[in-house]
Amino acid sequence: MTTDTPAQSVGCRVMTFTPSKEEFKDFGRYIAFMESQGAHRAGMAKVIPPKGWKPRKTYDDIDDLVIPAPIQQVVTGQSGLFTQYNIQKKPMTVHDFRKTSNMDKFCSPRYVDFDELERKFWKNLTFNPPLYGADVSGTLYDPVSGDRLHTWNLYISLKKILTDLDSVCGRQVGLLKNVVYTLLLCQCCYLSVCDKLLSDRIGWLSENLSSGAYLQVQRLCSVLQPR
């Protein structure tokens, strides 16, 4: 099995994996391999599917998909301390959301590397509040048919994993249904562990905290933002 990020140098960085067509057939087994390489330490990983694999034959027929409760993320603050307010907007279609995402003010800025992109993100965090379409019930995967049944169809694979967790842990954890997220390039998401179908145009900033560091951050937040 293959990974483009050596395990010994991974730290908390997002790892990239390039499974073969044969490896790609067994979702659970490959996830176990990824974790054996340390992929879970960053909270997310990037998987490049084998050439020719697509979750959906075409995306030309999803423009009428309705985002029932898009939110506008308004951020205020400075010097590393920010507060985000979510303002619910009127329902909109994917077509309208795409038009908004292609506006100049929401397009990815020019950058040399991800360090520069990160600096620009924090510098412009309080400008141009982006829209965010979260938890739209459904899936963009094609209906299950033929050899696509066990080939990383998240509707089937995620449901099985949740069932397995339920039997091992005695309870279900995390996301319990398939949902579609629509994001802008300047989007800010809460810290969470979930599955995402990522575009190669998006750069992800992911930080993983050890248990000790997590408690330190928690104490700092309680001082900066007391209830």
Image: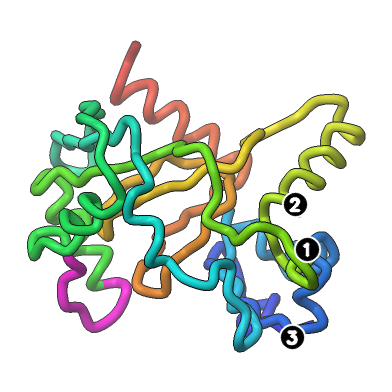
> Which kind of residue does numbered mark 2 sit on?
Ile
Left or right: 82 with respect to 217?
Answer: left
> Which kind of residue does numbered mark 1 sit on?
Leu
> Which kind of residue does numbered mark 3 sit on?
Ser
The residue that disc 3 covers is 20
Left or right: 65 with respect to 2?
Answer: left
- Location of the N terminus (image quadrant): bottom right
Could you tell me residue 50's position as x and y percent? 65, 84
The residue that disc 2 covers is 156
User: Quick one: SS at disc 2?
Assistant: helix
Mark with earlier residue (3, 2): 3
Left or right: 160 with respect to 198?
Answer: right
Labels 3 & 1 near each other (Cβ < 8 A): no
The residue that disc 1 covers is 149
Q: CA distance from mark 3 to mark 2?
A: 20 Å
Left or right: 32 with respect to 128?
Answer: right
> In percent of the image, x 16 and y 71: which residue is there?
109
Could you tell me residue 97's position as x and y percent? 24, 51
Q: Is residue 15 visible?
A: no
Q: Residues within 10 Å of mark 1 (few under 14, many from 20)?
A: some
> In percent of the image, x 42 and y 68: which residue is there?
199
Residue 121 vs 19, above or below: the answer is: above
Taking depth in this image into account, of 34 and 54 the one nearest to the observer is 54
Mark with earlier residue (3, 1): 3
